Amino acid sequence: MNERERFLSFLGIARKAGKLSMGADEACKAMETGRVRLLLLAQDLSPRSERRMRAAAETSGVPAFCAGVQMDEIALAVGKRTGILAVTDGGFAEKLTTMLATADPAARA
């Protein structure tokens, strides 16, 4: 299993654990309540949506990263096609951040 597959598998685990808010509306609601620890954005997310979500994350003080995967890959991992994932657990957020840094240090930008 390569790093990308491991990352996607871990997203699936986070989903099953109930530690992901998926989609722009759910992610924004979670950020407003201060529950989000990490915001992940798909590679093929529209530029407009990416700007909007990065601005919301910055306002909330939440780190936002490109997940390095496509929306279709996210759909296979979590069961819903989305380009925006808000991680609401600190442990999951830390592990996913580490996985991103290991897979591609440039993805943290």
Image: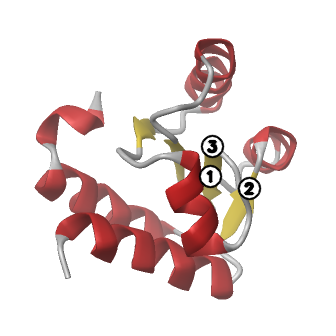
- The mark nearer the N terminus, 2 or 1, is 2
Circle 2 residue: 22
Query: Decide: marks 3, 1 in contact (CB < 8 A)?
Result: no
The Cα–Cα distance between marks 3 and 1, rounded to whole angstroms, is 7 Å
Query: Which is more toward the observer, 78 or 61?
Result: 78
Q: Residue at x 63, y 53 (%)?
A: 86
Circle 1 residue: 85
- The quadrant in which residue 32 appears is top right
- The mark nearer the N terminus, 2 or 3, is 2
Left/right placement of residue 28 relative to residue 96 reads right
Left/right placement of residue 63 relative to residue 5 reads right
Question: Which of the two discs, 2 and 3, sits closer to the camera?
Answer: 3
The image shows residue 14 at horizontal and vertical percentages of 56, 78
Q: Could you tell me which quadrant the C terminus lies in? A: top left
For label 3, the crowd category at 10 Å Cα-Cα, with few meaning under 14, some 14 to 19 and many 20 or more, is: many
**Taking 109 as reference, is 70 above or below it?**
below
- Color style of the picture: secondary structure
Q: Amino acid at mark 3?
A: Gly
For label 1, the crowd category at 10 Å Cα-Cα, with few meaning under 14, some 14 to 19 and many 20 or more, is: many
Local secondary structure at mark 2? strand
Q: Is residue 15 visible?
A: yes
The image shows residue 60 at horizontal and vertical percentages of 64, 32
Q: Amino acid at mark 2?
A: Met
**Taking 41 as reference, is 47 above or below it?**
above
Q: Could you tell me which quadrant the N terminus lies in? A: bottom left
**Taking 71 as reference, is 102 above or below it?**
below
Q: Amino acid at mark 1?
A: Leu
Query: Decide: marks 2, 1 in contact (CB < 8 A)?
Result: yes
Q: Residue at x 63, y 72 (%)?
A: 78
Circle 3 residue: 83
